[in-house]
Image (spheres, helix red, strand yellow):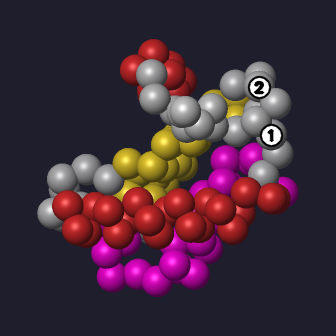
Amino acid sequence: MLKADVLRKKEDFTSIYKRERSVPSKFVVVFYRKNHLPYNRKAFLASKKVGKSVQRNRARRLMKESYRQLEEQLPQGWDFIFIARQTILDSKCADVKKSMEAAIKRAGILK
């Protein structure tokens, strides 16, 4: 069974990208929009610019764990796309969490 809180459809991705609401940080770029649902939806992406599959998978794992730690603080009803940057490869989970938290605060979502 598929999880409801994961973005999968191409229409969802294009609608988030078209809104052009993004916030860069040192390790990730966050695209976001309001979804008017009682839960948040998210996607974690790492392009081939980040590295080979091992590095891309590590980048996604770092972003997922950082999001999991921040999830309680976030208000409900948002779509997020987290895109890894190359700088994420040499970082620790705590650094990625701080970077994601700072980006979400600059977006005005997290207080």
Q: Residues within 10 Å of mark 2 (few under 14, many from 20)?
A: few
Q: Mark 1 points at which residue?
A: 76
Residue 106 position, x and y percent, is: 67, 54
Q: Nearer the viewer, residue 32 or 36?
A: 36
How dense is the environment of label 1, judged by Cα within 10 Å: few (below 14), some, or many (20 and up)? some
Image position, residue 3 (x, y; %):
59, 37
Q: How many marks?
A: 2
Specify whether residue 55 is in view: yes
Give coordinates of residue 19: x percent, y percent.
53, 24
Residue bearing the label numbered 2:
37
Mark 2 or mark 1: which comes first in sequence?
A: 2
Determine whether label 2 and label 1 are within 8 Å by CB. Answer: yes
Q: Is the magenta stretch mostly helix, strand or loop?
A: helix
Q: Judging from the image, what secondary structure is the residue with disc 1 in? A: loop
* Residue 105 as seen in the image, left or right of residue 17: right
**In the rendered view, would you say 44 is above or below 13?**
below
Residue 109 bears which disc, if any? none
Q: Residue lying farthest front?
A: 1
The kind of residue on which mark 1 rests is: Gln
The residue closer to the viewer here, 2 or 95, is: 2
Up/down of 78 relative to 30, above or below: above
Which stretch did the figure color magenta?
Answer: 85-111
Q: Position of residue 24 (x, y in %)?
A: 48, 54
Q: Quarter of the image for the N terminus: give it.
A: top right
- Which amino acid is tagged 2? Leu
The residue at 80%/59% (across/down) is: 72
